[in-house]
Image (tube, rainbow, N blue to C red):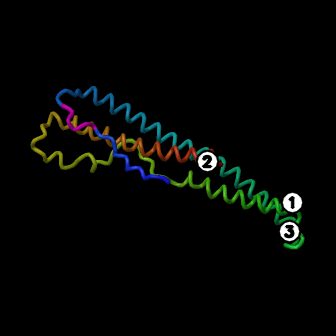
Amino acid sequence: SSFAQPPEMPWSIDQSLNIDRVSMEELKLIFNQAEKRLDSTTKEGENIASRTTTMVTLMAGLLIALSGYLISVWKGIITLTNKDLVAIFGCLYLLGLLIYAIRNIMTHRHFMTGSQPEDLVNSTYDDDEITRSKMLLLLYINEIESYNGRIVNNTALNREGWRRYRNL
């Protein structure tokens, strides 16, 4: 029997972190590394889609060729030869593979770098307890956490995409 795993909690920066000990340069370094990693996962997703498109093109060509052969030699269901049966099953198999492969090309929700302005400008600016000098630090921390969630999402999508691609 299989046991359901509890949902994984998204990573976040420890709330007990003393923000007075964090420098802007350190946050910029972490942010830049997260941005590079997120960009890498996005490019990997594009690579999977590109390779799958090539495979779909080849399979579609084979499907058209087999279908053309079947149409040209078709004389009725009673006069089917072994070659005709192989061509019919080949067409069905290729059609199944095409449907399976198309899932890698269909748009998945890959997250890109950058954030919507409405995600950055929020009620934090109305909080008088947060000093102006800490506002930029908090924005960087928020973006680092956001980028980590996007990286996790893209990595999972890419893992599934490669699995489907290898099964073709």
Q: Which residue is mark 2?
A: 52
Instruction: Give the image quarter of residue 115.
Output: top left
Tell me how far mark 2 sits from mark 3, CA to CA. 32 Å
Q: Residue 16 magenta-drawn?
A: yes
Dot 1 or dot 2: first in sequence order is: 2
**Mark on residue 83?**
1
Residue at position x 18%, y 38% in the image: 135
Residue at position x 36%, y 41% in the image: 147
Residue at position x 65%, y 56% in the image: 98
Q: Is residue 158 left or right of residue 93?
A: left
* x then y, percent, for residue 45: 51, 44
* x then y, percent, for residue 167: 63, 47
Tell me how far mark 1 sits from mark 2, CA to CA. 29 Å
* Front residue of this view, candidates 86 and 133: 86
Residue at the outermost left position: 128
* x then y, percent, for residue 75: 88, 71
Asked which secondary structure carries label 2, the reply is: helix
- In the displayed structure, would residue 142 be above or below residue 20? below
Q: Is residue 49 left or right of residue 71?
A: left
Residue at position x 36%, y 42% in the image: 114
* Front residue of this view, candidates 35 and 12: 12
